[in-house]
Amino acid sequence: MINIKYEELPDVEKKLLNEAEKAMETAYGPYSKFYVGAALLTNDGTIITGSNFENSAYGSTICAERGVILRANAMGYKKHKEIAIIGRGEDFDTEEVIAPCGSCRQVLYEVSQISDYNMKIILSTTKKEKIIITSINELLPLAFRPKDLRIDIKK
């Protein structure tokens, strides 16, 4: 994991984080009052965004990370390089970076297997004063993999 300042990010990663920030404003979070945005960079350089969408049946809630993966898949994009994640509370900014939950980490791991790439993950506080760059392999070591089921997802 690398701690980095916003100003030190390459332009493409600044843009990715800025797009995640815009997506955060579209989140639907009437229960937790917590809003998360994600922006995904595909292998061809396309940026796709998503935000969390809560539900009164809490288990039906979709996190921003899974939402953007589902959106990208529906658009025909299966291979991705990196994702940026940012969040805020209704009446507070985050003091620590926002990281994906366990279910999202598993989905991101699956996408990294499809992409044949250790997906880069940019985690940020609301005001971008603290940013961590990591990878899915760092966030989910010893992941449950398609090959554990003897499935070759490359077919």
Image: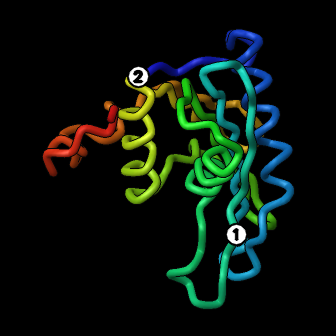
Work out whether 78 lies above or below 12. below
Toward which corner of the image does residue 127 lie, by quadrant? top right
Residue type marked 1: Phe
Looking at this view, name the residue that lies furthest to the front: 155
Residue type marked 2: Tyr
Residue 22 visible: yes
* Category of crowding for the residue at label 1, using alpha-carbon neighbours closer than 10 angstroms: few (below 14), some (14–19), many (at least 20): some
Mark 2 highlights which residue?
117
- The location of residue 3, given as percent across then percent down, is 52, 21
- Checking the image for residue 29, the label placed there is none
* Rendered residue at 81%/32% (across/down): 18
Q: Nearer the viewer, residue 138 or 46?
A: 46
User: Marks 1/2: CA distance?
Assistant: 28 Å
- The location of residue 105, given as percent across then percent down, is 41, 48
Q: Nearer the viewer, residue 40 or 21?
A: 40
- The location of residue 138, given as percent across then percent down, is 33, 31
Secondary structure under the numbered disc 1 in the rendered image: loop
Mark 1 highlights which residue?
53
Number of marks: 2
Which of the image's four quarters has the N terminus? top left
* Rendered residue at 32%/39% (across/down): 153
Residue 86 visible: no
* Rendered residue at 75%/44% (across/down): 49
Toward which corner of the image does residue 113 lie, by quadrant? top left
Secondary structure under the numbered disc 2 in the rendered image: loop
* Rendered residue at 63%/57% (across/down): 67
- Side of 149 where 94 appears, left or right: right
Say which of marks 1 and 2 sits in front. 2
- The location of residue 45, given as percent across then percent down, is 71, 19
Q: Are marks 1 and 2 in contact (CB under 8 Å)?
A: no
Question: Of marks 1 and 2, which one's residue comes earlier in the chain?
Answer: 1
- Side of 22 where 127 appears, left or right: left
